[in-house]
């Protein structure tokens, strides 16, 4: 088994990060073109705790080394991951647990991601993955498979941060524009009410 871990700090509030997280794989993220589909399987809220639980099926398309394709006996260009996430508004944590569905009889990839606030303006990101080759054979082959997947995690971590930063920036901009639009609409409504009141007073 090989372990991959990564931690980052985003200069955005937890509220911004937890909201933008649902848009992580949208067109705003030019680094997530390998994600071809995100399907929500279920979504529930625990009335006692307020925790939002969501299950999603994520389909990705990434090329694998030819030697690994040959070893697995087929095409590995597309894979599916099952993700379960928990958003706890009280403790202000987002926890996402995922496992591979594709080739899970040969490779086990268990990943956990947690977002929690550092302060009012920063959010900590913690990622941990356990990668285990389950296929029989020489340990050397298993090590090579696990090392290849750890390397892929490292590559995706760099792209993932860049992509999510873009999503966060766009999300902040969109929300700011929406708040400004609502403010202008309120001012227009107030001005209209004042004008109507003035006209009624002089009638």
Image (cartoon, grey):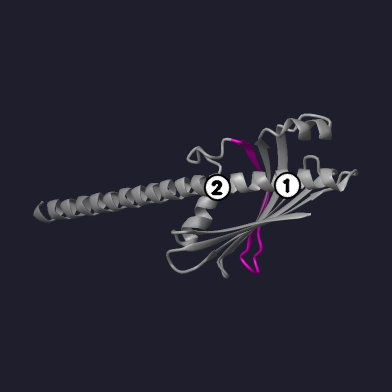
Which quadrant holds the N terminus? bottom right
Q: How many marks?
A: 2
Residue plotted at (62% across, 48% down): 154
**Residue 96, position in %: x, y?**
65, 56
Q: In terms of image quadrants, where is residue 44?
A: bottom right
Mark 2 residue crowding within 10 angstroms, few (<14) / some (14–19) / many (20+): few
Q: Residue furthest front?
A: 140
Residue plotted at (55% across, 47% down): 158
Q: Nearer the viewer, mark 2 or mark 1?
A: 1
Magenta segment, principal secondary structure?
strand
**Disc 2, disc 1: CB below 8 Å?**
no
| Residue identified by numbered label 1 | 147
Q: Residue furthest left?
A: 202
Q: Work out whether residue 43 or residue 35 is closer to the camera in this orientation and state it.
A: 35
Left or right: 88 as drawn, with respect to 19? right
Residue plotted at (74% across, 33% down): 76
**Residue 156, position in %: x, y?**
60, 45
Q: What mark, if any, has residue 92 been given in the picture?
A: none
- The local secondary structure at tag 2 comes to helix
Q: Tell me the distance, in whole angstroms, between the alpha carbons under discs 2 and 1.
A: 17 Å
Residue 185 appears anywhere in the view: yes
In the image, which residues are magenta? Answer: 34-52
| Residue identified by numbered label 2 | 158
Is residue 41 inside the magenta stretch?
A: yes
Q: In terms of image quadrants, where is residue 79?
A: top right
**Residue 80, position in %: x, y?**
72, 40
Q: Is residue 46 above or below residue 39?
A: below
Residue 41 appears anywhere in the view: no
């Amino acid at each position: 088994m090989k372990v991959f871990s990564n931690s980052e700090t985003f200069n955005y509030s937890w509220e911004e990060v937890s909201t933008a997280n649902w848009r992580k794989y949208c067109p705003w993220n030019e680094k997530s073109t390998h994600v071809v589909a995100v399907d929500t399987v279920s979504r529930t809220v625990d009335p006692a705790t307020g925790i939002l639980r969501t299950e999603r099926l994520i389909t990705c398309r990434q090329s694998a080394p030819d030697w690994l394709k040959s070893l697995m006996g087929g095409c590995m260009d597309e894979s599916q991951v099952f993700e379960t996430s928990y958003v706890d508004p009280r403790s202000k944590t987002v926890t996402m647990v995922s496992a591979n569905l594709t080739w899970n009889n040969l490779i086990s990839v268990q990943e956990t991601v947690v977002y929690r606030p550092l302060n009012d303006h920063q959010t900590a990101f913690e990622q941990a993955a356990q990668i285990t080759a389950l296929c029989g054979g020489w340990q050397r082959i298993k090590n090579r498979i696990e090392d290849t997947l750890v390397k892929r995690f490292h590559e995706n971590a760099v792209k993932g941060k860049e992509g999510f930063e873009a999503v966060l920036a766009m999300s902040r901009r969109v929300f700011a524009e929406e708040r400004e639009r609502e403010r202008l609409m309120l001012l227009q409504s107030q001005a209209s009410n004042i004008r109507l009141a003035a006209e009624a007073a002089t009638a």
